[in-house]
Amino acid sequence: MISKRFQLLLLCVLFSVPARCETAPHDGLNAALWTQTSVELKGNSRGMYRLAELMLDKALKDETWTAAPLTQGEKFQGKPPAVMLDVDETVLDNSAYAAWQIATGNHYSSKTWVPFVRAEQSLAVPGSLEFIKVARKKGVQVFYVTNRKAPQEEATRNNLKALGYPIDESEDTVLLKGEKKDWGSAKGTRKSVITEKYRLVMVIGDNFSDFTDDYKGTLAERQAVYDKYSDYWGTRWIVIANPTYGSFESSAFGGNYSLPADEKRALKVKAMTPWVPKED
């Protein structure tokens, strides 16, 4: 059932009555607005995928090139190449769900996320389809590795196919959380499945956890892991900007989602380094 508040908001949008279009403050407003409406997002995303194409050519010429330093193992040079992409906010644009949260005053919940996934209405992240098609033409296998849960696989595949994304049906190339017993939120186990057969030449994602299982921890600990792989960023690992959600936010409040909203907000403010004006 549509809430009265959402009905009012819809009427405001349709009939342009700004005086009645007030919504409660929401931490995600600017991030969702930027993600859904800005040309800057489109330019950033297309630029990163064009960088990925350039790096892919380098990777294919260098058989020692791998994007999986911990799971690739030895004697991988003769294996066929593959790329691994996250799905949400890397391939599929779910900004409509973020906008719904803002409009209705809600926050992420599996009770609302699952129906959104099943609606199969996510859009294409700019540049992603073009890159994937180029990779396939060059003989590179494409794996979609997502933390959407296993029961959502059919809807995820349908949404990808409807937008024209190629999916190789000769093997399982859409790997979801919980699809196998040891496939949890960390993606290392699924990455290992890929590297058993392929030389993983590139990882593309929007969250630190798409690249390393060491994504949790304090801000300083995450910085140390980032620095450890400094040569990978922009070469083997390509990041698509996503300010709407991710481990960047949860790390500020220790991943404790049970905290009240005002406490999480206070910890996020505390995590920042503000400008301190000099006294005259």
Image (spheres, rainbow, N blue to C red):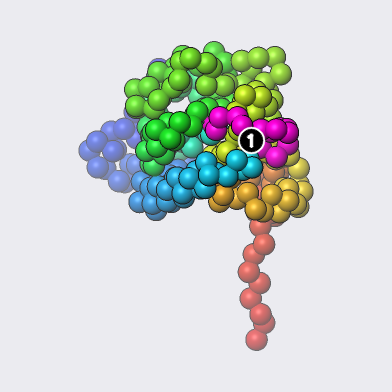
Work out whether residue 43 or residue 48 is closer to the camera in this orientation and state it.
48
**Chief secondary structure of the magenta span?**
loop
Q: Residue furthest front?
A: 78
The quarter holding residue 157 reads: top left
> Farthest residue in the bottom direction?
280
State left or right for residue 162 relative to residue 35: left
SS class, disc 1: loop
- Image: 242 above or below 101: below
Q: Residue at x 22, y 38 (%)?
A: 15
Asked if residue 147 is among those painted magenta in the image, a careful observer would answer no
Picture mark count: 1
Residue 268, image x and y in percent? 66, 49
Q: In which quarter of the image is residue 189?
A: top right
- Residues 150 and 34: in front is 150
Q: Name the residue under label 1.
A: 77
Q: In which quarter of the image is the N terminus?
A: top left
Question: Is the residue marked by circle 1 packed among few (<14), some (14-19), or many (20+) residues within 10 Å?
Answer: some
Can residue 50 be seen here?
A: yes
Residue 135 image point, x, y percent:
44, 35
**In the picture, which quadrant includes the C terminus?**
bottom right
Name the amino acid, label 1. Gln
Question: Taking 219 as reference, is 203 above or below it?
Answer: above
- Asked if residue 92 lies left or right of residue 172, the reply is left
Q: Is residue 101 visible in this depiction of the protein?
A: no
Residues drawn in magenta: 67-82
> Looking at the picture, how far across and down is residue 45, in whole percent?
43, 46
Q: Residue at x 44, y 22 (%)?
A: 167
Image: 153 above or below 238: above
At x 29%, y 38%, the residue is 12
Viewer-side residue, 79 vs 127 = 79
Check if residue 72 falls in the magenta segment.
yes
Taking the image as shown, residue 205 lies to the left or right of residue 271, namely: left
